[in-house]
Image (cartoon, rainbow, N blue to C red):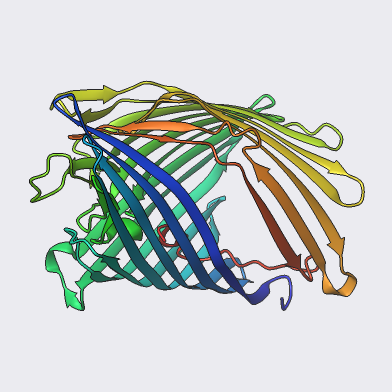
């Protein structure tokens, strides 16, 4: 920091996960014309290693009445994800066969972004102008090993994507009423390559306008706001791959390089009174990407299916009502929150008929943070999700999760502060889930509860004197990784 009107800085973060192991089982019984056909029992493993380098540099300043905020971001990561299946198959006569498949997947991102925001007071309000640019070079590779011949191939894909955006916003007070309106334009180019060769049909160009508007004012002791925005949800990079992964004898999973962005119109009403908050969120979304199960292309086996994301044909409405209460009672900081979600999503069923997924569901949260002596903090959180519909998923079980955690700060004097965070999730093994994915083929899955523990160690130095003002760039693109 130079002075109150000019500051600049930079930070670098290295994130390394040397190992993350997962094991589980997947059992499938198959029937044909109501007659038992065979049983597949699979032991599944996954071993993930992950490294990430994050960089940010910024300048924040003021020249006369002109405010300037400039950021440069970099993100470089690599993920290695070997996984596989050991499958035992028993047919109706008791004959047994064995199949072992090892999958090897790797991905990398090489991402840069810049963002410039200028603010200037005009006519009792503030005008904001800005621009943003980002570039990502994403690679995905897949290979497998098996003694059996499978209907999949090794793949090597690359996505080179650049996004350029400009935005403008103006806001001012009219008495007690604050009004703000803005617009953003984004141009995105995606080049898609398979084994080094550009694929024209999978390479895309998009140019879109996104308006926003906001009204806010106090009504007595209640603060009210009403906002509108048009959003875009671009596909995650992992969903754009054409790699096909073996799950078990009946099921494969792949991405979809032809996925399009989803667009939504969102209206939000917010009312706040002291520690009480009430939010009503309505949205209309089209072209949303959802997972569907379909017959495996080119296969004569009627039980062989492939799971992949597709864009929905019809748009749908969603209503979310979310009251919450967050008081402070001495050293106790509780949060009570409830969410009611209703939609009218349309999907095909296995019978070929269209069905509207409109069963609402609730989400309840009770979180507690308690400050204790000696820089110790306790956390207890209870979450409950009822049965209901989300996109083309029907949640068929009520899931309940209770977690406990304890944090302790250790002062290291000139070296800063060390924080240890120990947590246990799903203490009573009650977070059991069951879903049915509707589509041309219906897939039903039940997941048992899993109690697990985590320990996070964080070291912060020069925290009290830090006046870092970097705001970052390319946040929406980073979220897709």
Work out which quarter of the rendered image holds the C terminus and state it: bottom left
User: Residue 456, image x and y in percent?
Assistant: 69, 58
* Point 26% across, 70% down: residue: 157
Residue 277: quarter of image:
top right
Q: Is residue 174 left or right of residue 154?
A: right
User: Residue 79, image x and y in percent?
Assistant: 44, 68
Residue 197: quarter of image:
bottom left
Of residues 257 and 264, the one drawn nearer to the viewer in this rendering: 257
User: Residue 292, image x and y in percent?
Assistant: 25, 41
In this rendering, is residue 178 above or below 138?
above
Badge count: 0
Work out which quarter of the rendered image holds the N terminus and state it: bottom right
Q: Is residue 387 left or right of residue 138?
A: right
Q: Is residue 464 visible?
A: no
* Point 23% across, 55% down: residue: 256
Of residues 95 and 368, the one drawn nearer to the viewer in this rendering: 95
Going by the picture, which residue comes out furthest to the front? Answer: 94
Q: Is residue 409 visible?
A: yes
* Point 21% across, 72% down: residue: 193
In this rendering, is residue 370 above or below 273?
below
User: Residue 411, image x and y in percent?
Assistant: 87, 64
Of residues 264 and 61, the one drawn nearer to the viewer in this rendering: 264
Going by the picture, which residue comes out furthest to the top? Answer: 359
* Point 72% across, 62% down: residue: 457
Q: Is residue 264 left or right of residue 174?
A: left
Of residues 80 and 257, the one drawn nearer to the viewer in this rendering: 80
In this rendering, is residue 9 above or below 26?
below
């Amino acid at each position: 920091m130079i002075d109150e009107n000019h500051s600049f800085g930079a930070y670098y973060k290295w994130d390394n996960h040397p190992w993350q192991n997962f094991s589980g089982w997947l059992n499938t019984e198959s029937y044909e014309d109501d007659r038992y056909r065979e049983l597949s029992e699979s032991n599944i493993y996954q071993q993930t290693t992950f490294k990430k380098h994050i960089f940010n540099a910024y300048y924040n300043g003021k020249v006369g009445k002109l405010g300037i905020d400039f950021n440069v971001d970099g993100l470089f990561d690599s993920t290695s994800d070997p996984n596989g299946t050991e499958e035992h198959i028993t047919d109706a006569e008791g004959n047994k066969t064995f199949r072992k498949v090892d999958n090897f997947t790797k991905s990398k991102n090489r991402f840069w972004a810049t963002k410039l925001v200028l603010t200037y007071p005009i006519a009792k309000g503030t005008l904001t102008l800005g621009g943003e640019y980002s570039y990502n070079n994403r690679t995905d590779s897949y290979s497998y090993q098996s003694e059996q011949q499978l209907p999949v191939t090794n793949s090597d894909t690359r996505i080179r994507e650049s996004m350029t955006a400009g935005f403008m916003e103006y806001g001012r007070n009219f008495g007690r009423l604050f009004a703000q309106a803005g617009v953003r334009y984004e141009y995105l180019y995606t080049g898609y390559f398979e084994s080094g060769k550009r694929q024209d049909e999978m390479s895309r160009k998009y140019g879109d306008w996104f308006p926003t508007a906001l009204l806010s004012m106090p009504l007595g002791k209640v603060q009210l706001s009403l906002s509108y925005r048009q959003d875009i949800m671009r596909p995650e990079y992992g969903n754009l791959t054409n790699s096909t992964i073996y799950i078990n004898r009946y099921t494969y999973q792949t991405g979809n390089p032809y996925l399009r962005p989803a667009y939504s119109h969102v209206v939000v009403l917010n009312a706040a009174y002291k520690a009480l908050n009430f939010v009503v969120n309505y949205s209309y979304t089209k072209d949303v990407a959802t997972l569907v199960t379909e017959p495996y292309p080119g296969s004569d086996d009627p039980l062989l299916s492939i799971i992949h994301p597709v864009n929905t044909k019809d748009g749908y409405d969603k209503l979310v009502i979310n009251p919450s209460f967050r008081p402070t009672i001495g050293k106790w900081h509780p949060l009570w929150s409830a969410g009611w979600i209703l939609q009218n999503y349309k999907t095909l069923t296995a019978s070929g008929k269209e069905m509207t997924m409109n069963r609402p569901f609730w989400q309840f949260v009770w979180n507690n943070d308690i400050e204790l002596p000696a820089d110790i903090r306790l956390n207890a959180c209870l979450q409950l999700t009822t049965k209901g519909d989300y996109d083309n998923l029907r949640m068929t079980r009520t899931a309940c999760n209770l977690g406990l955690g304890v944090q302790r700060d250790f002062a290291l004097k000139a070296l800063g502060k060390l924080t240890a965070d120990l947590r246990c999730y799903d203490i009573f093994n009650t977070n059991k889930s069951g879903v049915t994915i509707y589509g041309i083929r219906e897939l039903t899955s039940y997941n048992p509860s899993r109690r697990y523990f985590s320990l996070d160690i964080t070291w912060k130095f020069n925290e009290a004197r830090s006046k870092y003002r970097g705001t970052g760039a390319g946040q929406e693109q980073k979220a897709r990784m």
